[in-house]
Image: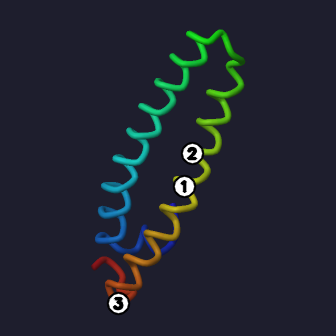
């Protein structure tokens, strides 16, 4: 929760819409990675790395995206 997304409805809605898609994609990637590591009898650490790196990357991206949407909306509160 960033101050600009809490104070701007457009930023809040757009960020959550994009974030939901990105996290579903991360879930699918994690599932596929888990299947591959299980089939190859590889370390499960690979799946953990995919989850961690993916979640951190998506979170940072969404923070930047929400700020850009906020600024594009004129930086207005409750817009």
> SS of the residue at dot 3?
loop
User: Do residues under tags 3 and 2 come within 8 Å of each other at their CB atoms?
Assistant: no
Residue 48 occupies which quadrant of the picture? top right
Disc 1: which residue: 59
Measure the C-alpha gap from mark 3 to mark 1: 23 Å
Indicate whether 22 appears above or below 7: above
Number of labels in the image equals 3
Q: Is mark 1 on a helix, strand or loop?
A: helix
Q: Residue at x 61, y 12 (%)?
A: 40
Residue labelled with disc 2: 55
Q: Label 3 crowding class (10 Å Cα cut-off): few <14, some 14-19, many 20+?
A: few
Residue at the disc numbered 3: 74
Q: How far apart are marks 1 and 2 (CA)?
A: 6 Å
Specify few, some or many for label 1: CA neighbours under 10 Å numbering under 14, 14-19, or 20 or more. Answer: some
Q: Which of marks 3 and 1 is nearer the N terminus?
A: 1
Q: How crowded is mark 2: few (under 14 residues within 10 Å), some or many (20 or more)?
A: some
Label 2 sits on a secondary structure element that is helix
Instruction: State yes or no: discs 1 and 2 in contact (Cβ < 8 Å).
Output: yes
């Amino acid at each position: 929760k960033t101050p600009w997304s809490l104070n701007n409805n457009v930023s809040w809605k757009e960020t959550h819409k994009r974030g939901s898609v990105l996290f579903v994609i991360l879930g699918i990637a994690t599932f596929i990675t888990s299947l591959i590591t299980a089939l190859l009898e590889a370390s499960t650490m690979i799946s953990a790395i995919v989850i961690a790196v993916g979640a951190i990357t998506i979170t940072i991206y969404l923070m930047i995206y929400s700020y850009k949407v906020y600024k594009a909306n004129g930086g207005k509160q409750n817009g």
